[in-house]
Image: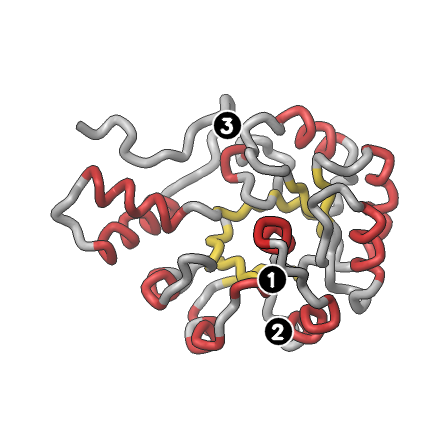
Amino acid sequence: MNFYLGQPGNQMQAVYLEDMPVCVSFANYSKWMDDYAPSWSRVLVDSGAYSELNTGKVIDLAEYREWAQQWGERPDAIAALDDISGEHERTIRNVEAMPEGIGFPTIHDTDPPDILPDLIDLARLHGNWLGIGLLPPRNSGVTFIRWVCDNVPDDLHIHGWALGAYAHIKRLDSVDSTNWFMDSWKVKKAVPWLTPAECCEVVIKRYKRWERPLGEPYHLALFEDVR
């Protein structure tokens, strides 16, 4: 599980992510994060494609490529600037524009299925990772995710973007959480005498102790039964 460090990005998030795997996005990375990056156990670099879709602010591919390369060999992987809206030709162009070995592609449920073989070939050239993404809301994607997982060779690492709710699908090698910080406010509501920082710490501890279930899907909501 990679903890997505983004909006509302602040130092408290970064402090409590010490020794944790972190997903950082070009779309909302701030200079102050440089001070905390050495403390994270692992790093996954994201282009911010969802932020581009959500805000309409186009990400400059050349600027992203330069920023991504500055991370050197620190990240486990670096994602390409994929297109979530369904313009899959742009996804392919952007992957091909990245240096060999970085900039792995992502297939979305908005893409035509026949693009998958081409993305697999690109994944082999760009770090041996392939992403899976769903257009929000992400509550009905199990059929698509299983189809992708069943058709991707075992030697490729599959990452699920914001797919923590689908982590029971064993072929997903990693996922990232976009709502972990907001989960701390659920803790705050349930246990109001805790400080916001303490609530954040509780959520981190919960994930540190979390293991994937072996069978049925599960729900990641915290304290939903607290009275």
Q: Quadrant of the C terminus?
A: top left
Of 216 and 46, nearer the camera is 46
Name the residue carrying label 2. Answer: 71
Answer with the quarter of the image where residue 93 lies. Answer: bottom right
Q: Residue at x 67, y 61 (%)?
A: 58
Within-10-Å neighbours for mark 3: few <14, some 14–19, many 20+: few
- Marks 1/2 in contact by CB < 8 Å: the verdict is yes
User: Residue 134: x percent and y percent?
Assistant: 63, 38
Name the residue carrying label 3. Answer: 214
Whether residue 218 is situated above or below residue 95 in the rendered picture: above
User: Residue 112: x percent and y percent?
Assistant: 82, 35
Q: Label 1 to label 3, Cα distance in Å?
A: 29 Å
Answer with the quarter of the image where residue 36 lies. Answer: bottom left
Q: Earlier in the sequence, mark 1 or mark 2?
A: 1
User: Residue 185: x percent and y percent?
Assistant: 28, 46
Q: Is residue 153 left or right of residue 135?
A: right
User: Residue 194: x percent and y percent?
Assistant: 16, 50
